[in-house]
Amino acid sequence: MAKYKNHILVCGGTGCRASESEAIASNLNASLSENNLQDDVQVVRTGCFGFCEKGPVVKMVPDNTFYVHVAPDDAEDIVLEHVIKGRKVERLLYVDPETKEHVSDSRHMDFYKKQLRIALRNCGFINPENIDEYIARDGYSALGTIMEEMTPEAAINVVKDSGLRGRGGGGFPSGLKWELTRKSEADQKYVVCNADEGDPGAFMDRSILEGDPHSVLEAMAICGYCIGADRGLIYIRAEYPLAIKRLKIAIEQARDYGLLGNDIFGTGFNFDVEIRYGAGAFVCGEETALIHSMEGLRGEPTVKPPFPAQSGYKEKPTNVNNVETFANIPAIFLKGADWFKKIGTEKSPGTKVFALAGKVNNVGLIEVPMGTTLREVIFDIGGGIKGGKKFKAVQTGGPSGGCLTEDHLDLAIDYDGLLASGSMMGSGGMIVMDEDDCMVSVAKFYLDFTVEESCGKCTPCRVGNKRLHEMLDKITLGQGEEGDLTRLRNLANVIKDTALCGLGQTSPNPVLSTMDNFPEEYQSHVKESKCPAGQCRALMQYVINSKLCVGCTLCSRVCPVDAISGEKKLPHVIDSSVCIKCGACIEKCKFGAISIQ
Amino acid sequence: MAKVKIPENKVQELRDLCKNFDNEPGELINVLHGAQGMFGYLPAEVQEIVADEMNVSVAHVYGVVTFYSFFSMLPKGKHPISICMGTACYVRGAEKVLDEFKRHLEVKVGETTPDGKYSLSCLRCVGACGLAPVVTIGERVYGRVSPEDVRGILEEY
């Protein structure tokens, strides 16, 4: 970033690109050229800023003005007003929801105040397609220092001392994993980066790869040096075209600079990285399944031991870490294990990235120190619940995690705390739900997912989850029986105890945690055939209040199945045996006479 | 399934594709990605050629194709519609949007309209959760879609 006076950072993450951020960047460039400013101001397409709710996001550097909800047509104003006249474009500034005042600097926004960015340190700052910008922020200097000054054992000790735990879900100590792989004797070893982010609603790995691919490559090379591997493989979902494209560019650039390939830094160390594509199978996030998939097989898990550290890809020792884990590595070496250990909690040092989504005001990607409470995340950073509704539950850990309630809001987030409360860290999906969400339906939604994604190898997962799903379906249809809840719990526990892999063992978690935390909701479905949240269609009844109905006939005309009858100017009635509960009548009624019971 | 006749030049292209990966069985998934890129889907005939070329059984190829949701044995419509059913989209009403597409197109998930114009499928999270619920048609992404928007979206095509 040498010769330009100013930079305009345009978010080029998948979310913002879907809202035409590419057009914003090209309009900015066009407008800069028109005003002969192309040599003074540079437009940079960065990775994700995290504040997806307000996207597309544009940030002006050096004055840090943060523009939100920018449209391609706004580009000219940004150039004419901000760049040329030095006046902020007020209408594009963020409005603080409480004070209603404009906030121009992102550091003063509640969304960013409590965040601490380590894994995301470069996302939204640098152009991910330019290796020089990564190097300018100390990129690859950790690799250089380690190779010149440290033995692999000493470097592994740094990772061990930092206390870094795997960010993919299980939380296994990364340093220990590296050490185990180092100690396995073999002529060939592999470093694998797990970028098969399958948890629906989690997108941190994708954002890191889109926003800062070099940090992952650098960490993989460090890992290769430590464990004695000269080949790295990145297993990435084919559904992430932008991340793939940027990774490919990054790999090429790193090779050109001699940071990948043979004789890196003249030390005789060889390391190169290639990309392998996933093809849409959630189970491939499990490391043994992932390895089989990379071998061109069905992605079915196998029993551990042997662990991949002993026998992994092509039966050689393989170290598998996920994207976020790797993204932490260069920072740990640059700033030291002690620095890292001071952040977060004793047993879970560092930060965690969460994809905050669902019924929360500020949807986006956030990174907070471990130990931050759920309340801080949802209400301070997330800005509370959308539409002034009441908070009901938050699901962490995706399909393997559980639903936590208001009682857990002051829980400090770390691996062990979440596990003890019946959920888990998982990859970091965090879905917020409000009073309108039916917890039985949510459990059924996750089971839908598990049933579809079960690889089918072991019976508890393949058949057990199917039965769980059928029972939940029955309950949401109002056909639940007294014994169903006991059967549901028993079967869920059996699956938990007997399934082959981590995914199967955790698949009943959404059912068990909703049953534990919302027993009354299950009871009302089963005993009273009622859905308190009003979501289960089969349990709803549309009723016309005869005192409010004036007989305008609007509802009967709009009803697609002729379920509503009545004389003109007289109260109408709905035949619930015909009604398909589409809700068209409620929308048409001007007198508020129709309600759901 | 009806027999699909693959033109000779395409057969050669497919065989070349396998050779590019050294006919190495470990590269099967990469080969299938390439083949789906060429044909749009993976009919039985394509799988047979791949199996022959890579020296594995057709059953093995079929096993892999059917295991992964990204691979399809049915041709997609001219405008493939995908509704995101990730959790973020789900809690923001993706199911109602999906129902509306089903109603308009009169097809089920995984099917293609008789005129071959649209096909309907679900996917798990495109990672644009800030825009939930999300629908993609081809390369185009539609965010914050409500059931009322569906008709208008379809009219664009």
Image (cartoon, rainbow, N blue to C red):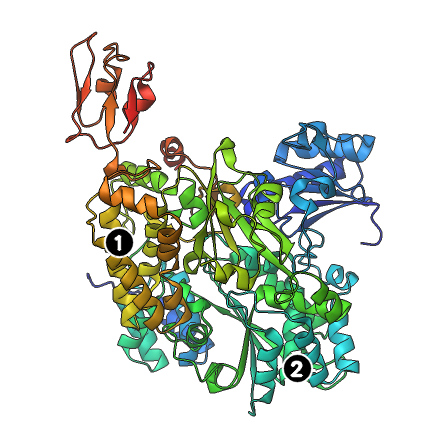
Residue A388 in the figure: left or right of residue A159: left
Residue type, numbered disc 1: Leu
* Residue that appears at 56% across and 60% down: A205
The residue where tag 1 is placed is A485
Q: Quadrant of the N terminus of chain A?
A: bottom right
For residue A226, which numbered disc appears in the image? 2
Residue B103, by quadrant, is: top left
- Identify the secondary structure beneath mark 1: helix
> How far apart, in angstroms, are the residues tagged by discs 2 and 1?
51 Å
**Camera-side residue of A113 and A422:** A422
Residue displayed at 59% across by 55% down: A412
The x and y percentages for residue A570 are 19, 9
B130 and A405: which is toward the camera: A405
Foreground label between 2 and 1: 1
Task: List x then y, in percent, for residue B112.
Answer: 28, 48
Q: Residues within 10 Å of mark 1 (few under 14, many from 20)?
A: some
Q: Badge 2 sits on which subunit?
A: A
Amino acid type of the residue that numbered disc 2 sits on in the rendered structure: Cys
Residue A128's image quarter? bottom right
Q: Nearer the viewer, residue A125 or B114?
A: A125
Q: Quadrant of residue A489?
A: bottom left
Farthest residue in the top direction? Answer: A569
